[in-house]
Image (cartoon, helix red, strand yellow):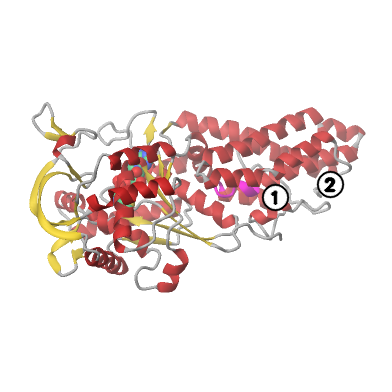
Amino acid sequence: ASASHGAGRPYYLTTAIAYPNGAPHIGHAYEYISTDALARFKRLDGFDVRLLTGTDVHGQKMQQTAEKEGIPTTELANRNSDRFQQLQDRLGSSYHRFIRTSDEDHKRASAAIWQRMVDAGDIYLDTYSGWYDVRDEMFYAEGDTEVDDAGQRVATDTRHVLTWTEEQSFFFRLSAYQDKLLDLYQSHPDFIGPDVRRNEVVSFVKGGLTDLSVSRTTFDWGVPVPGHPDHVMYVWVDALTNYLTGAGFPDDEATYERYWPADLHIIGKDIIRFHCVYWPAFLMSAGLPLPKRVFAHGFLFNRGEKMSKSVGNVVDPDNLIDEFGLDPVRYFFLREVSYGQDGSYSAEAIVSRINADLANEFGNLAQRTLSMIGKYFDGAVPAPAEFTEDDRRLLTATDELLPKMRAHFDAQAIHLGLETLWTTLAETNRYISAQEPWKLAKTDLARTGTVLYVCAEVVRVVALLAQPVMPTACGTLLDLLRVDDHRDFAAVAQRLVPGTELPKPAPVFPRYEA
Ligand code: ME8
């Protein structure tokens, strides 16, 4: 095998950790599928990948939901965390750890970062009074709120009803980090992606930062503040720290040295401020290295409408997989939605991608190629004769796929990576229609073999490179091509060996019939 690109270097990426106050929905599934595809890409490209995911069990909302359901908060957290973990497993996620912020090592990590912020002189005791959004676990300045028609105080941006909160609280000196954060965004333009999010963050921070209330005393569901057991940490302090816990902080030095700082935090666009303002400020205060990049994906909408329990359009990811199959669902979301932008889904759109992209463009090409190899060459990879210019153009385009995919995936442009593959598949379908190997077979078997060899090469390379998105289907295609030993991206540079006996082909991407 040729040398691998990553050469075993570490690559640590994370998803957001969800609040387990209800069942997971498509938005969560989307985040897991996309992050897993990024992780698999890096792994196949030779990196030593760690993918962390899990649940964010603390906070006032969790305690309130449990009270409403009349069950202990731990029970709610455990029951729903299990559902999130089961979803990850069903999606085929290649996570190395499913963290729950109730884990003991996480409590130690949270206490350790807190103590470092205390030692830096950034934590002080005061009284908090102001508006709190329990649903988003977020404080609001008076100016960002208004009174709605029903006379309730709501957040101007989200319209969530706010609660007046007045209690003794520890504060984090966020105001001291304004310049340091602006320097960070300037000196590390890749710290936040996509660019539109970066601009939002920069203008938010330029608008001035106030100190942040980072502990609560009116409820006790959280990580206790070291030395002040009457305070629990503000849920976002402990939640963000999960990324450090997953890298062995503070006990496992070898792991920490190897994997921290994280290469990539994948999150949704609603929690950018926490990840791009608070999190780097906490880390700067604690004297710890900052993650290299935070990338925010967009929101998914059902037929363009916000998913909500009251509208009744919340789709259970399990049902989608039951209906369409895992790989097609993974492909659909990653191809249909421009990563970083909002997207919409519907059954019709999924069916159309399955039939047009998977069954026609990819499946037919593979099936035609393999069955003609069966029919005209007894199922053995034909030896190509001399390549024509058309053959060479296609083979060259195929050779260029890996570097192009790398560039797209490194920019988290997953949809563009897939588009690149499908452009080559479309070209190959035009090529096979123009070459007509089924007619050539009657007059020129050598030329038939060359054409089929070129097509099989395209199928092989696309199957290798689409593995991060459709691991199972691509694995089956690679079985059919007898790519047995090395299936990582180093294998792209190898060619099919003429004479290799191929198994009897079976369609890998069936059409969807309702
Ligand atoms: O925010 N489409 O948890 P969460 C796409 N616990 N993504 C969506 C979405 C949608 N419709 N709805 C939610 C939290 N998400 C915190 C995170 S991280 C240290 C703590 C995404 O359960 C959302 O943007 O509300 C977030 O990235 C993830 O799902 C979990 O959301």
Residue 98 appearing in the image: yes
Q: Is mark 1 within 8 Å of ligand 1?
A: no
Verify whether residue 286 appears in magenta.
Answer: no
Residue found 61% across the figure and 35% down from its top: 359
Verify whether residue 464 appears in magenta.
Answer: yes
Residue 191 appearing in the image: no
| Residue position marked by numbered label 1 in the rendering | 480
* Residue 128 percent location from the top left of the image: 10, 51
* Residue 478 percent location from the top left of the image: 67, 51
Position of residue 158 in the picture relative to residue 452 (left or right): left
Q: Which quadrant of the rendered structure holds the N terminus?
A: bottom right
Q: Give the image quarter of residue 390.
A: top right
Q: Give the image quarter of residue 301.
A: top left
Position of residue 151 in the picture relative to residue 512 (left or right): left
| Residue position marked by numbered label 2 in the rendering | 382
Label 2 crowd bin: few (<14), some (14–19), many (20+), radius 10 Å: many
Q: Give the image quarter of residue 125.
A: bottom left
Dot 1: element: helix
Dot 2: element: loop
Residue 221 numbered tag: none
Residue found 41% across the figure and 45% down from its top: 186
Magenta segment:
463-470
The amino acid beneath tag 1 is Leu
Position of residue 280 in the picture relative to residue 254 (left or right): left
Q: How much space separates mark 1 and mark 2, taking CA atoms?
A: 15 Å
Q: Where is ligand 1, by quadrant?
A: top left
Residue found 14% across the figure and 40% down from its top: 162
The amino acid beneath tag 2 is Pro
User: Most extreme residue toward the top, as rendered?
Assistant: 149
Along the line of sight, the residue nearer the viewer: 330 or 394: 394
